[in-house]
Image (cartoon, helix red, strand yellow):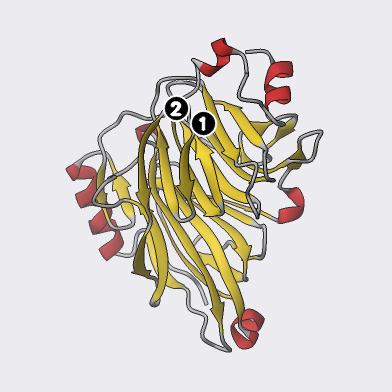
Amino acid sequence: MKKEKIDKENGNLSDNSDERNFNNYRSIKLVTKSNETPEGDGFVVHRCFPSGVIRNLDPFLLLDEMGPLDLLTYESKGFAEHPHRGFVTVRYMLDGRFEHKDSQGNSGRLGPGDVQWMTAGSGLVHSEMPEKEFAKNGGRLHGFQLWINLRKTDKWIKPDYQDVPSTRIPQVSTPDGKVSAKVIAGNYLDAKAVINTLTPILYLHFTLQPGAQVVQSVSENYNAFAYIINGKGLFGKDKTAVGEKNLIVFENDGEIISIRESDDAKSPLDVLLIAGMPLNEPIVQYGPFVMNTREEMDKTLEDYRNGRIGKINS
């Protein structure tokens, strides 16, 4: 599909669009509501998966929405020291402020629009706690955490930490201004993400005005899903209507994903679109550790018990 056609379609595609393109649209495999789940020091997240319906969406292991919560003074809670090995954690903040520390000596702050892309690799210990002023003053907390599996050959690499402020996240709009996107990973229109990923990933945050449509090209072998933050949209080949706090999983039956905001919508549609190449490798998971074999997991647990995964220095 030519880029000029994609750019045009990403504006406002009519129901009379090219039939050949329509036949290449992906259909919807399932729609499932996120579930409220206690996490960290006790705040509740909306967990999209894993769930009783979806174990994982290879290469993706978990998607949580934190909040939105309006927190009072010193009501904010976080994630005290805990380990990871064998995968990537991605935190994308919409509102609120967190501080990060890890056993590799990295530290940083996350504010609205910022992204933390942490490759745990061979293992580390980290913490994510409310920034002191935010905890003191209170405010709105809202964001997402995504876990991405690593290939067997990458599970033992040195941990890596990318702290990307909102000012470095590419933002782009269609010529008519009806669709805007933040490009966290992958590409959209002429914008390319600044984050380096070991696993091929597409991670886009779209805002669609009433009547707008996104038609995104995605490799047919990529597993893909969307999550509605706010609003209600029409998804896939059949234009299935889906509302907020729902996860939409697409079939691998085409190379085009369609997301549309209805013409009579009273507010914009805010939605994440995430896709990635499946690894097709065995998964052995125990909490914050993700390996390929039981033997590797036994070694990981032994390493953690003996302090070999790391410790955060005060």
* 200 relative to 208 in the view: left or right: left
Asked if residue 87 lies left or right of residue 2, the reply is: left
Would you name the residue on which mark 1 appears?
200
- Is residue 90 visible in the rendered image? The answer is yes
* Residue 229 in picture, x, y percent from top left: 54, 55
Could you tell which of marks 1 and 2 lies nearer the N-terminus?
1
Question: Residue 214 sits in which quadrant?
Answer: top right
Q: Residues within 10 Å of mark 1 (few under 14, many from 20)?
A: some
Q: Nearer the viewer, mark 1 or mark 2?
A: 2
**Secondary structure beneath label 1:** loop
Instruction: Measure how far apart labels 1 and 2 are at the Cα level.
Output: 9 Å
Residue in front for this viewpoint, 204 or 82: 204
User: Residue beneath label 2, please?
Assistant: 222
Q: Position of residue 61 (x, y in %)?
A: 36, 46
Q: Residue at x 74, y 41 (%)?
A: 178
Q: Residue at x 24, y 57 (%)?
A: 301
- Farthest residue to the right: give it: 175
Q: Amino acid at mark 2?
A: Tyr
Residue 69 got which mark? none
Residue neighbourhood size for the residue with mark 2, other residues' Cα within 10 Å, grouped as few (<14), some (14–19), many (≥20):
many
Verify CB contact (< 8 Å) between mark 1 and mark 2: yes
Tell me residue 91's x, y (percent).
Answer: 54, 56
Residue at the front extreme of this rendering: 264
Position above or below: 98 against 269: below
Residue sitting at x 58%, y 61%: 106
Looking at the picture, which amino acid does disc 1 mark? Pro
Q: Nearer the viewer, residue 55 or 266?
A: 266
Q: SS at mark 2?
A: loop
